[in-house]
Image: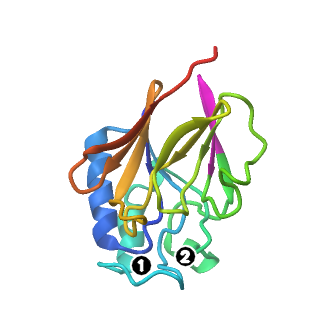
């Protein structure tokens, strides 16, 4: 199984369309969205291509493939525009080799871990900074932001397969970070 991970779209239809094109090209089974989908938030500048309605329409075309969690900028009003659920603050995806704990990152993050077992993964967004590393037998994975990268980073997304997790550049698909999946079975 291949999972495509994106976070912090912040209502940019331009970035969302680019991300969806990468999703299509990846042949991933599911599109995991880690929150902050439609609104830019009060601390962020309005991103290029800001159009929450068109962003929602673009995402809705993939509603049957999406697993999403709520970000700190998402609201019940956003849910009214979307044809897939976004109100859960976390979700679990069970893979044969590990459990993925999906969350936005404003509640649970590397500094405030949820209850996890050895070989589990915390998959989070919020910081807009990519991460792909193990810490004490827990995989920490953040795909960065498709729209508002921080720390002079690049717009990015992630992929998780049975053997590897990757962060890739949104503009040219360049590999930015990778980490092998540890198997404990």
**Left or right: 147, with 162 as reference point:** left
Report which quarter residue 10 is drawn in: bottom left
| Quarter placement of the N terminus | top left
Given residues 177 and 147, the one toward you in this image is: 177
101 magenta-colored: yes
Give the extent of the magenta segment: 92-102
The 10 Å Cα crowd at callout 2, few under 14, some 14 to 19, many 20 or more, is some
Residue 100 sits above or below residue 19 on the image: above
Residue 52 is tagged as 1
| Quarter placement of the C terminus | top right
**x and y, in percent, of residue 45 in the image:** 42, 84
Residue at the image point whose x is 20% and y is 51% from the top: 172
The 10 Å Cα crowd at callout 1, few under 14, some 14 to 19, many 20 or more, is many
Given residues 32 and 154, the one toward you in this image is: 154
54 magenta-colored: no
Residue extending farthest to the top is 185
- Residue under pointer 2: 78
């Amino acid at each position: 199984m291949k999972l495509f991970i994106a976070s912090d779209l912040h209502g940019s239809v331009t970035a969302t369309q680019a991300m969806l094109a990468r999703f299509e090209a990846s042949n991933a089974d599911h599109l995991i969205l880690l929150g902050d989908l439609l609104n830019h938030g009060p601390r962020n500048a309005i991103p290029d291509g800001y159009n929450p309605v068109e962003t929602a329409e673009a995402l809705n075309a993939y509603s049957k493939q999406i697993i999403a969690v709520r970000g700190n900028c998402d609201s019940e009003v956003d849910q009214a525009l979307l044809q897939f659920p976004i109100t859960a603050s976390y979700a679990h995806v069970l893979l044969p080799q590990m459990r993925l704990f999906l969350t936005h990152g404003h509640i649970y993050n590397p500094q405030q871990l949820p209850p996890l077992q050895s070989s589990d993964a915390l998959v989070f967004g919020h910081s807009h900074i990519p991460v792909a590393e193990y810490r004490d037998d827990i995989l920490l994975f953040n795909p960065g932001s498709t729209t508002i990268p921080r720390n002079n980073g690049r717009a990015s997304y992630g992929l998780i397969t049975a053997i590897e997790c990757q962060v890739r550049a949104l503009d040219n698909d360049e590999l930015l970070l990778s980490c092998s999946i540890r198997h404990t079975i």
